[in-house]
Amino acid sequence: MTAPRILSVAGSDSSGGAGIQADIKTITMLGGYAMTAITAVTAQNTCGVQGIETMHPDLVMDQVESCLTDIGADAIKIGMLGSPEIAMRLAERLDTFPGAIVFDPVMVATSGSVLADEATIGAFAALMQIATIVTPNLPELAALTGRDEIAEEDVFDAATELADAQDTIVLAKGGHGEGDQVIDYVVSSSGKIASFGHQRIETRHTHGTGCTLSAALATMLAHGQPLTHAIRIARAFTRAAIEQAPGFGEGSGPLGHHAVRKLFED
């Protein structure tokens, strides 16, 4: 069987835990063929981001064109963008893309380092409007809906507001919330589609969780899975990768992507 083709448009993480590197691992472990368009190169480890060099928009778009006009893609995952120009040009180019587009609106690394300025965040709207699904965590959801923060009881309303404003589906990830349970909501402009919950894992090794989840979701959609089932599998993969974290680094360590495939095969 031919592997589904997934193009990841994201930044490079030199330590391998997030961004392009996490996406390639995830897509490969889930049976997809990974391609990349690198938007920025970071000097990064588990303790933080030490440097960022954003790619020129022309080079980013050349990478996208090289992939789409030859090998093609069944789904696209978009993560760290680097600049508003990159966001706007991607939105224009991918407006007629026939496959699934998963947009992870990356603003801040797990370590707390800022990865998107206000102008870039302002340009996110153009991508949300063409995305199949947008996957913000709670701080990102707050920023995208003009809130300082989001209380647990307001997550559903905020996600619905964003889905309605951008005419998309929103997966509001609850990992930044409080309590023993992590609750994720999937909503459209017409209301809740589904919700998922699991026991919170107490660990410092969560670097790249958002990248992993969005890449897994794009891969499952490219495999032809229905949306809610694709989310269910992507969440299970991400949770297993957290549980299998190798324990590397002094800060927020990477996930154990390499150890998960056998668990899924079993």
Image (cartoon, helix red, strand yellow):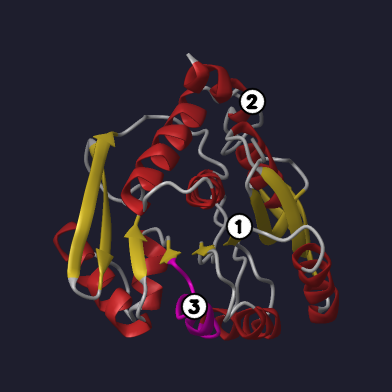
Dot label at residue 170: none
Q: Quadrant of residue 113?
A: bottom right
Give the residue type that dot 3 points to: Ile
The answer to whether residue 45 of the structure is visible from this angle is no
| Residue placed under numbered mark 3 in the picture | 130
Q: Earlier in the sequence, mark 1 or mark 3?
A: 1
x and y percentages locating residue 135 in the rendered image: 42, 60
Decide if residue 172 is on the left or right side of residue 117.
left
Nearer to us of marks 1 and 2 is: 1
| Separation of residues labelled 2 and 3 (CA atoms) | 32 Å
* Mark 3 crowdedness (10 Å alpha carbons): few <14, some 14-19, many ≥20: many
Decide if residue 173 is on the left or right side of residue 213.
left
| Separation of residues labelled 1 and 3 (CA atoms) | 15 Å
Give the residue type that dot 1 points to: Asp
| Residue placed under numbered mark 1 in the picture | 74
Above or below, 183 against 7 in this view is above
The residue at the point 62 percent across, 32 percent down is 29
Whether 129 is among the magenta residues is: yes
x and y percentages locating residue 5 in the rendered image: 66, 51
| Residue placed under numbered mark 2 in the picture | 258
Q: Secondary structure at mark 1?
A: loop
Please give the range of residues in magenta. Answer: 122-132
